[in-house]
Image: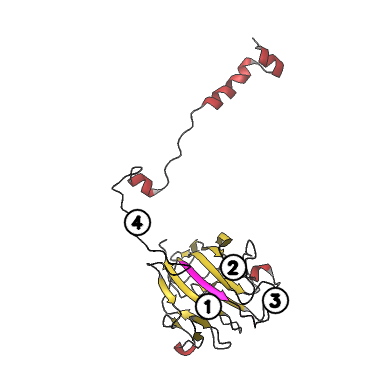
């Protein structure tokens, strides 16, 4: 038997039935994957409240942050011969070219990091020269610091790049003489007992309030002119700022350790 619509479409009534049945099949709810959702009822008023944190003003450190540089001294840092030879003045720390890199005395793993940096107007940027530094997480995963307004270089080495790995989504760099801000969510890689990677690291970076790295995978320890690869290391290692021979400035550095 054929219905008028089936005759027009050129199909039998029986052939049309499965389509109707499939379309009418009930939609099943997706299984809960969040452990907290299994333990607590929706809107459960007995569920523990999160800790209260006071936000900082204008990029200032929130109440639960560890202040790494408050504009006064470099007591949280160390350098060559256990000294920091960078200059602190007027709330700013400036690289003393040739004095060496500096590192935090304490180690950190996954974290939220806020850091502000500026290329002085007196610096002349040419490719990778004249206005170069870097922020290294766990002493080896670099977020590039470079004057890039204006300055043309290879894109995986410009400001906001995960050096040698991921270019920034956009160039959000301010001109020399103006302050730039990085707000970074860093998730540390994990290693098994055999040294193999069990979980790769990632970075999300806001550059002057603009997203430039969106949960980007870390391929391994930063390398120049070579593919990165992982080598097992401790769960907590220092934050590291680079002396690349240029007198860049930093201020307002704070960190919030994150649980994995």
Q: From the top left corner, tell me how far across and down residue 197 is, in percent.
A: 50, 63
The residue wearing badge 4 is 50
- Residue furthest left as drawn: 46
Q: From the top left corner, tell me how far across and down residue 180 is, in percent.
A: 57, 71
Mark 1 or 3, nearer chain start: 3
Question: Badge 3 local density, few (<14 within 10 Å), some, or many (20+)?
Answer: some
Rounded to the nearest angstrom, the CA distance separating label 4 from label 2 is 32 Å
| Of the two numbered discs 3 and 4 in the rendering, the one whose residue sits closer to the viewer | 4
Rounded to the nearest angstrom, the CA distance separating label 2 from label 3 is 16 Å
Which residues are drawn in magenta?
112-127
Q: From the top left corner, tell me how far across and down residue 127 is, in percent.
A: 70, 76
Rounded to the nearest angstrom, the CA distance separating label 3 from label 4 is 46 Å
Mark 3 or 4, nearer chain start: 4
The residue wearing badge 1 is 250
Tell me, yes or no, if residue 31 can be seen here.
yes
Nearer to me, 16 or 229: 16
- Residue furthest bottom as drawn: 81
Mark 2 or 3, nearer chain start: 3
Mark 4 element type: loop
The residue wearing badge 3 is 127
Question: Badge 1 local density, few (<14 within 10 Å), some, or many (20+)?
Answer: many
Mark 1 or 4, nearer chain start: 4
């Amino acid at each position: 038997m054929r219905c008028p619509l089936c005759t027009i479409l050129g199909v039998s009534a029986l052939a049309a039935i499965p389509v109707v049945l499939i379309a009418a099949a009930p939609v099943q709810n997706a299984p809960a994957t969040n452990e907290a959702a299994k333990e607590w009822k929706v809107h459960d008023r007995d569920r523990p409240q999160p800790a209260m944190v006071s936000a900082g003003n204008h990029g200032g450190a929130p109440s639960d942050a560890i202040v790494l540089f408050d504009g006064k001294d470099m007591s949280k840092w160390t350098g060559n011969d256990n000294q920091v030879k960078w200059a602190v003045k007027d709330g700013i720390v400036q690289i003393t070219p040739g004095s060496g890199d500096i590192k935090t005395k304490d180690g950190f793993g996954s974290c939220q990091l806020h850091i502000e940096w500026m290329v002085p107007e007196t610096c002349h940027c040419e490719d990778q020269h004249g206005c170069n530094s870097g922020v290294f997480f766990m002493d080896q995963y670099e977020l590039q610091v470079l004057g890039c307004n204006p300055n043309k270089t290879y894109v995986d080495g410009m400001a906001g790049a995960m050096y040698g790995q991921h270019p920034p989504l956009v160039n959000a760099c301010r001109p020399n003489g103006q302050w730039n801000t990085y707000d970074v969510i860093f998730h540390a890689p994990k290693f098994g007992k055999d040294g193999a990677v069990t979980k790769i690291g990632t970075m999300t970076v806001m550059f002057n309030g603009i997203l430039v790295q969106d949960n980007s995978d870390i391929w391994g320890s930063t390398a120049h002119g070579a593919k990165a690869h992982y080598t097992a290391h401790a769960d907590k290692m220092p934050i590291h700022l680079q002396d690349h021979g240029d007198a860049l400035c930093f201020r307002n550095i704070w960190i919030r350790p994150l649980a994995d």
